[in-house]
Image: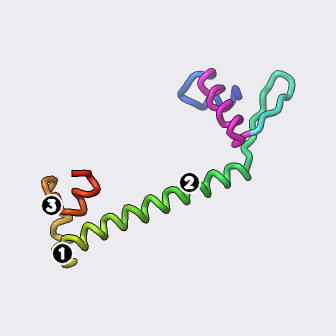
Amino acid sequence: MGELAAEMPVTRPAVSQHLKVLREAGLVSEHQEGTRHIYQLNPIALAALRDQLDTYWRRALTNYTKILSDDTDDRGDSTKQRERKSHDPDPGDRTPARRRRLGN
């Protein structure tokens, strides 16, 4: 832990607390060699976390794309008009789809 803490811009107690959280989450394991605490990544848990994050972001981006598509469909703009508007967004633009999303 000392070697890791030496490379971090935070205090040793802060690094220790972060490692404790990672250990409790199962992302790292710890064993002791004398007075040293050795931490090792758990590749299976890390892969599972990565899979969850990938799924989360894939859904978020898919939903965002759908919202943008719905907004464009509601306006009935042609591609050229959308491109022109995208360079000069109007913050006062409140199309029906945008009002529904904003709750206005």
Which residue is denoted by mark 2 in the rendering?
53
Residue 13, compared with residue 31, is above or below; it is above
Q: Residue at x 72, y 40 (%)?
A: 28
Mark 3 neighbour class, 10 Å CA radius: few under 14, some 14 to 19, many 20 or more: few
Q: Residue at the spot x=52%, y=56% of the render? A: 56
Amino acid on which the number 1 mark rests in the picture = Asp
The numbered mark, 1 or 3, whose residue comes first in the sequence reads: 1
Instruction: Give the quadrant of the N terminus.
Output: top right
Q: Secondary structure at mark 3?
A: loop
Tell me the mark number nearer the camera, choosing from 2 and 3: 2
N-terminal of the pair, mark 1 or mark 2, is 2
- Residue 49 magenta: no
Residue 39 at what x, y percent from top left?
75, 36
- For label 1, count other residues whose C-alpha is less than 10 Å away and answer few (under 14), some (14-19) or many (20+): few
The mark closer to the camera, 1 or 3, is 1
Q: Position of residue 63 (x, y in %)?
A: 40, 63
Q: Return the disc, 2 or 3, that comes first in the chain's sequence.
A: 2
* Residue at 78% in and 33% down: 38
Question: How many numbered markers are drawn?
Answer: 3
Q: Which residue is disc 3 drawn over?
A: 88
Q: Quadrant of residue 75?
A: bottom left
From the viewer's perspective, tell me whether residue 99 is left or right of residue 36: left
- Magenta segment's dominant SS is helix
Q: Nearer the viewer, residue 53 or 74?
A: 74
Type of residue at label 3? Asp
Across and down, in percent, residue 81 comes to 16, 74
Alpha-carbon span between mark 1 and mark 3: 15 Å
Report the magenta residues as a range. Answer: 13-28
At x 19%, y 75%, the residue is 76
- Residue 77 numbered tag: 1
